[in-house]
Amino acid sequence: MKDLLLGTLFAFVLMLASPAWAHAPIMGIGGVAGGALHALLIPEHGMSLVALGAFLGRQQPVARRWEALTFMAALTGGLVLIALLGEAALAADFLLLATAILGLLIAVDWAPPFLGWVLAAVTGGALALDSPPEVSSTGEAIRMLIGSGLGAALAVALLGEAAGWFRAYGPLVVMRVLGSWIAAIAILVLSLRIATRLATG
Amino acid sequence: MSRTTFQSLRSLIALALTLMPTMVLAHSENGVAIDFKGGFTHPIFGPDHVIAMVAVGLWGAFLGMPAMWLLPVVFPVVMAFAGALGVLGVPLPGVEIGIALSAIALGTMVALAARPPLWVAAVLVGAFAVFHGHAHGTELPIGADAVAFSMGFVVATGTLHLAGISFGTLSRWPAGRIAVRAAGGIIAVIGLVYLSRSL
């Protein structure tokens, strides 16, 4: 009888636990596909990829592709690092900072190649370091990291090439408005993150 | 199972069940929704902000290209910088007066069909965006779902500009021009009311 009581109590204690989600899960999707979706559907990451893609679209084709490769190299390095470290503090802050700068540059329609190299590297590294796999199995973690890398690299390559096609006045204006919105969102999110950190110690 | 054991088990289950419910909140703490919807409604539920942002769109449309899109690009960026100062607790005196003055000035510009150089219009709009941004920043809930809230907030601001631009494009026609200038006059008068309240 005592075992029954203890068992019942233990079962209820287990039921008390609520899941700790960093963000809403997509049920049933894991592995490489889950990692790729993670890179694209997390709002901060998606916004950063769009900002970098739109910025690269303003560059000449050769510079654009080299900067996309820089992003991919930094992304790969960051993914290897996060696989070894498990977590990296301030990665999200650096990602938001790079996104805000990218948004501002798009808004003012200024795309100097030297800044493109730096921002592509920072965005790639910070995005990777802000993507720790939230699974217990090593194999699944590696699959998700590969997926995150592939998703982000593909998104930047496609967005950069697509944005390069929009050279007419109308689409340029839309890009500049979009850039100002991205910059504003990134600045507000970064300030809220800092304020929350200051408030909670 | 004895009667005593059954009662013990029943009491234990009842106790455990009382521990199980999670909080059901009709709305979030501080009475502020902290998601996209909360961010979207935040500027829209402040009439003083609404009229100023609509006035930015009206004036931009009145001035034509490139002011039509340049002013709504300047406003959110400056607003976000000032909002960050507000979030971080950096004080700014006379915020409410500045917001009221923004409605008066921008409404008057539309009413008078003023056409200053583009940089003057951009500086004016940017200067007033500081007050709006700071006011919003101090009201933003710390610990909010920052991305969703900020996205809603910025999209709402852009939507209000777009509403102003849409109405402002009526100025292509003589009757529409009168309607747009009248709207500017109304905004300026509402701004005067806010100014008298904030003094």
Image (cartoon, helix red, strand yellow):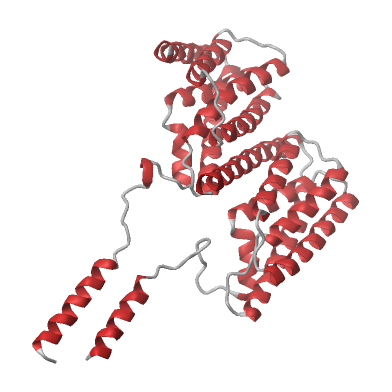
* Residue situated furthest left in the rendering: B3
Coordinates of residue B136 in the picture (x, y in percent): 50, 32
User: What percent of the width, then of the height, locates residue A160?
Assistant: 77, 52
- Locate the C terminus of chain B by quadrant: top left
**Left or right: where B145 falls relative to A130:** left
Residue B162, x across and y down, in percent: 56, 31
A96 or B91, which lies in front?
B91
Q: Is residue B169 visible?
A: no
**Which residue does the image show at 65% across and 25% down from the upper left?**
B71
Identify the residue shown where x is 46% and y is 14%. B191
Q: Is residue B199 left or right of residue A186?
A: left
The image quarter in which residue B8 lies: bottom left
- B107 up-or-down from B90: above or below: above
Vertically, is B108 above or below B54?
above
Is residue B2 left or right of B132 when viewed as pictured?
Answer: left
Residue at the far top in the pictured view: B112
Decide which of B166, A66 is in the foreground and name it: A66
